[in-house]
Image (tube, rainbow, N blue to C red):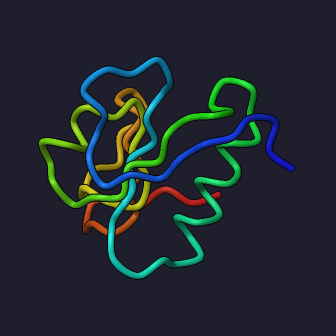
Amino acid sequence: LFSKAFEVVSECPVERDVKLIGTHDGTFHCDEALGCAMLQMLPAWAGATIVRTRSEAELAKCDIVIDVGAVYDHSKLRYDHHQRTFVSTL
């Protein structure tokens, strides 16, 4: 199903050679699990490390952030739908 192996960590690696997908820690929910899986299936994100944290400092190091951080901004690759300003739907 996934073209490359990936790992899940709680802090961003100091040295890295793969992209980082940031999402929240704690209990898994369907939305971030699906989002991470869909990204991993894309060639550009295959093998990316998933960083599970709520630390803004750690999330700022990630290449893309989904379902955490209270920011929805495509230009910054930040996709959280849990804030009052989120109004986009398909």
Q: Residue at x 42, y 37 (%)?
A: 64
Q: List x then y, in percent, for residue 48.
A: 56, 35
Q: Residue at x 61, y 42 (%)?
A: 6
Q: List x then y, in percent, for residue 84.
A: 25, 68
57 with respect to 15 (left or right): left
Q: List x then y, in percent, for residue 23.
A: 39, 56
Closest to the observer, 79 or 60? 60
Q: Residue at x 33, y 77 (%)?
A: 26
Location of residue 13 by image quarter: top left
Q: List x then y, in percent, for residue 24.
A: 34, 64
Closest to the observer, 11 or 65? 11
16 with respect to 61 (left or right): right
Closest to the observer, 82 or 54? 54
Q: Residue at x 47, y 48 (%)?
A: 50
Against 75, is 64 above or below? below
The total of numbered circles placed on residues is: 0
The C terminus, quarter of image: bottom right
90 with respect to 3 (left or right): left
Against 4, is 22 above or below? below
